[in-house]
Amino acid sequence: MRYLIPVLLVLSMGVPAANAQMTADVKFAPGNYGTMVNGTVTGDEFFDYKLGANAGQKMFVELNVAGTNGNGTIYFNILPPGSDGVAIYNGSINGNTTTLDLPDSGDYTIRVYLMGNDRDTDKTVGYNIDLSIQ
């Protein structure tokens, strides 16, 4: 047992820290049904934007690169309320602009992330997202 503690300490020092995840709640100004958000992601980071919507509403999302030290390989996914990471829209497959009919009421997540060489080489990509619920 006395040898187990030093082994556990050595093993825990070799484990890299978890990738950063950032989250923000999206609020629309009174009388508006949309907004613009912006930020940056680097490497394996991802940024989750959360907003409430009702079943039957339409969500519009358009993601644009606003500067990069790499190739600008950035995408977004839309996750439904209660999702464990499974998306109902995948930007890396379907593109960086969508209007999506929302199937459920609750809090949706727009997850912004990098892929490919930008992710693998820790590049930083700035972005703007035009977002609305109708």
Image: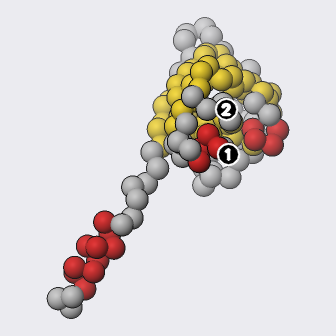
Q: Nearer the viewer, residue 59 or 96?
A: 96
Dot 2 surroundings within 10 Å: few (below 14), some, or many (20 or more)? some
Secondary element type, mark 2: loop
Q: Residue at x 26, y 73 (%)?
A: 9
Q: As shown in the figure, which amino acid type bears the numbered disc 2? A: Asn
Describe residue 66's horizontal placement relative to residue 45 as left or right: right
Describe residue 74's horizontal placement relative to residue 18 as left or right: right
Real-space CA distance between mark 1 and mark 2, rounded to the nearest whole angstrom: 9 Å
Q: Nearer the viewer, residue 38 or 131?
A: 38
Q: Nearer the viewer, residue 77 or 107?
A: 77
Question: To which quarter of the image does residue 91 belong?
Answer: top right
Q: As shown in the figure, which amino acid type bears the numbered disc 1? A: Gly
Q: Is residue 50 above or below residue 44?
A: above
Q: Are marks 1 and 2 in contact (CB under 8 Å)?
A: yes
Residue 12 visible in this rendered orientation of the protein: yes
Describe residue 84's horizontal placement relative to residue 91 as left or right: left
Q: Residue at x 59, y 26 (%)?
A: 68
Point out the tag, 1 or 2, that comes first from the N-terminus: 2
Question: To which quarter of the image does residue 124 belong?
Answer: top right
Task: List x then y, in percent, for residue 100.
Answer: 79, 32
Disc number at residue 66?
A: none
Residue on which disc 1 sits: 116
Q: Residue at x 61, y 40 (%)?
A: 118
Residue on which disc 2 sits: 71
